[in-house]
């Protein structure tokens, strides 16, 4: 099954940012700050059938602004559901110098990340970051007041639509931060082109990624 590939131009622009170093390992794409690292790390699961590189353009400005390290694991057959515990190996392999970890993902990747965060991860999880995604009841996050949670949705998302995300809001902690980006669709959380079944975006991809980055930067700086 052919995955959605990263678009060349956004990936090149992310790689050209002076404050970010992007490395492609066999098991993950890793974004690190060129300057002083903050000690914060994020393991981020890609959406279904989307390659890891497709999220570099979305995370690069966050890394540049916050000094965080972001690890985007490569999933078997590009499906996080086949290895929902992959974060454990990612942290063991790429976690040097990181003291505070967040776990997150896009779409199906977000649901799997939430489930792992609510289970028995091999590392302490400080928070969860969901993009165009939601936690199921089985994730067990609703009563986890020790977790800082951010849920970002797009108003034009045709795959994880705002109604579905709102219907599952009760599966997150009461103090979870929820942000809807007006005009954004599902595929704009990454940079991999159009996706079947998605809504029609009312803002362009760079504007969507900029709004997303601002939201995530504010969350990480406040938590």
Image (spheres, rainbow, N blue to C red):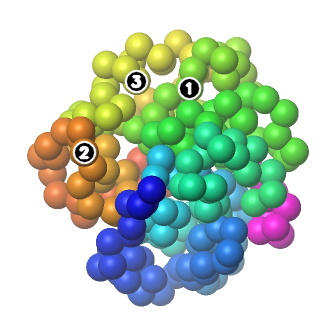
Q: Nearer the viewer, mark 1 or mark 2?
A: 2
Q: Name the image quarter holding the C terminus.
A: top right
Tell me, yes or no, if residue 115 can be seen here.
yes
Q: CA distance from mark 3 to mark 1?
A: 9 Å
Q: Nearer the viewer, mark 2 or mark 3?
A: 2
Q: Position of residue 179 (x, y in %)?
A: 38, 34
Q: Specify the segment rendered in magenta.
A: 91-101
66 horizontally vs 141: left or right? left
Disc 2 residue crowd, few under 14, some 14–19, many 20+, Cα 10 Å: few
Q: Name the image quarter holding the N terminus.
A: bottom left
Q: Identify the secondary structure beneath mark 2.
A: loop
Query: Are the residues at dot 2 and dot 3 in contact (C-beta closer than 8 Å)?
Result: no
Q: Identify the secondary structure beneath mark 3.
A: helix
Front position in the image: 46 or 34: 46
Which residue bears the numbered disc 3? Answer: 165
Disc 3 residue crowd, few under 14, some 14–19, many 20+, Cα 10 Å: some
Tell me, yes or no, if residue 58 can be seen here.
no
What residue appears at the point 87 percent right and 45 percent down from the top-left corner? Answer: 122
Q: Position of residue 37 (x, y in %)?
A: 69, 72
Disc 1 residue crowd, few under 14, some 14–19, many 20+, Cα 10 Å: many
Which residue bears the numbered disc 1? Answer: 135
Which residue bears the numbered disc 2? Answer: 196
Among the two numbered marks 3 and 1 on one chain, the one whose residue lies closer to the N terminus: 1
Q: Position of residue 158 (x, y in %)?
A: 25, 34
Q: Is residue 195 magenta?
A: no
Q: CA distance from mark 1 to mark 2?
A: 23 Å
What residue appears at the point 61 percent right and 80 percent down from the top-left corner? Answer: 23
For residue 140, above or below residue 114: above
């Amino acid at each position: 099954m052919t995955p959605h590939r990263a678009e060349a131009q956004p990936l090149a622009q992310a790689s050209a940012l002076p404050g970010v170093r992007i490395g492609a390992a066999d098991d993950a794409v890793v974004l690190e700050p060129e300057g002083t690292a903050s000690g914060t790390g994020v393991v981020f699961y890609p959406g279904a059938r989307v390659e890891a590189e497709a999220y570099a353009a979305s995370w690069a400005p966050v890394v540049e602004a916050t000094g965080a390290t972001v690890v985007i694991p490569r999933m078997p057959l590009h499906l996080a559901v086949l290895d929902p515990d992959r974060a454990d190996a990612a942290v063991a392999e790429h976690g040097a110098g990181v003291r505070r970890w967040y776990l997150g993902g896009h779409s199906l990747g977000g649901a799997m990340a939430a489930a792992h965060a609510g289970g028995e991860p091999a590392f302490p999880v400080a928070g969860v970051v969901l993009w165009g995604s939601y936690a199921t009841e089985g994730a067990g996050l609703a009563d986890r007041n020790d977790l800082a949670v951010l849920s970002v949705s797009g108003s034009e998302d045709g795959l994880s639509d705002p109604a579905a995300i709102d219907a599952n809001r009760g599966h997150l902690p009461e103090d979870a931060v929820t942000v809807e980006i007006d005009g954004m669709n599902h595929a704009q959380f990454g940079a991999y082109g159009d996706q079947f079944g998605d809504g029609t975006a009312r803002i362009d991809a760079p504007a969507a990624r900029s709004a997303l980055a601002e939201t995530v930067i504010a969350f990480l700086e406040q938590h």
